[in-house]
Amino acid sequence: MRDAAEPDTAIEEDTAVAVDDVAVDTAKPLADAPTGDGGPIFDAPSPLPGCTVGFRLGHEYLFCENTANWDQARNTCRIAGYDLAVVSDRPEHDFILGQLKGKSKDQFHIGLTDRDDEGNFVWVDKSKPGFTSWAGWQPDNWLFAEDCVVVRKDGTWNDVDCTDGPKEGFVCESL
Ligand SMILES: [Ca+2]
Ligand SMILES: [Ca+2]
């Protein structure tokens, strides 16, 4: 019978088993990781020029300063095996902002668009936005021509023209 007086050794055994399970099953999402810092111990080279690499909760991100419109950005991510980033919650958003801090560009395409149905934003993985971080008065679909979303370094989102390029970098994520 188990109770609170059970010897410490039994608890240690249980813990060891759980850790082994995580280590063996590499496909298992690291959802329980306290900090999400599961990145490699060496700096990883970016598969795309102009980008830096980040890791969080088993996902890999590219933070790219290349000038690109939304479709160019998305296609570039996909060529490298990623897609534009899907920002599911505030911790993920905070992680991305931290990675963008030192960049020279001010805004970055992410994988959110209402191109198929005006006013109805969806992520590139077809999920509906839960967490959002719209700037004041955004999304405004300015000139009836803004269907693609950027995250700005101040943490706010704006819908922009999907053909915008010169100002925007982009964020890729392994989905
Ligand atoms: Ca729109
Ligand atoms: Ca806008």
Image: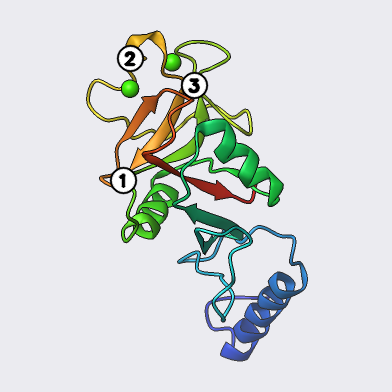
Which image quarter has ligand 1? top left
Name above or below for residue 52 compared with residue 129: below
Q: Earlier in the sequence, mark 1 or mark 3?
A: 1
Q: Hey, which quadrant is residue 23 in on the image?
A: bottom right
Mark 2 C-beta closer than 8 Å to ligand 2: yes
Kind of element beneath mark 2: helix
Residue at image position (52%, 77%) is 4
Residue 119: percent from left, percent from top: 44, 13
Say which element carries label 3: loop
- What crowding class fits label 3: few (fewer than 14 Cα within 10 Å), some (14-19), or many (20 or more)? many
Q: Amino acid at mark 1?
A: Asp
Single out the mark in the foreground, 2 or 3: 2
Vertical side of 128 occupied by 24: above or below: below
- In depth, the one of 158 and 120 nearer the eye is 158
Other-residue count near label 2 (Cα within 10 Å), few / some / many at <14 / 14–19 / ≥20: few
Q: Residue at x 39, y 9 (%)?
A: 144
Image disc number at residue 106: 1
Cβ of mark 3 under 8 A from ligand 1 = yes
Q: Looking at the picture, tell me which residue is in the foreground, 134 or 71.
A: 71
Q: Where is mark 2, residue-wise?
A: 142
Mark linked to residue 85: none
Amino acid marked by disc 3: Phe
The residues tagged by marks 1 and 3 sit, at their Cα atoms, a distance apart of 22 Å
Distance, label 2 to label 1, CA atoms, is: 19 Å
Q: Earlier in the sequence, mark 2 or mark 3?
A: 3
* Residue 121 disc label: 3
Q: Nearer the viewer, residue 154 or 143?
A: 143
Q: Is residue 154 left or right of residue 6?
A: left
Q: What x and y, as percent, mark residue 166?
A: 40, 38
Query: Residue at the location (33% across, 14% down)?
Result: 142
- The kind of secondary structure element at disc 1 is loop
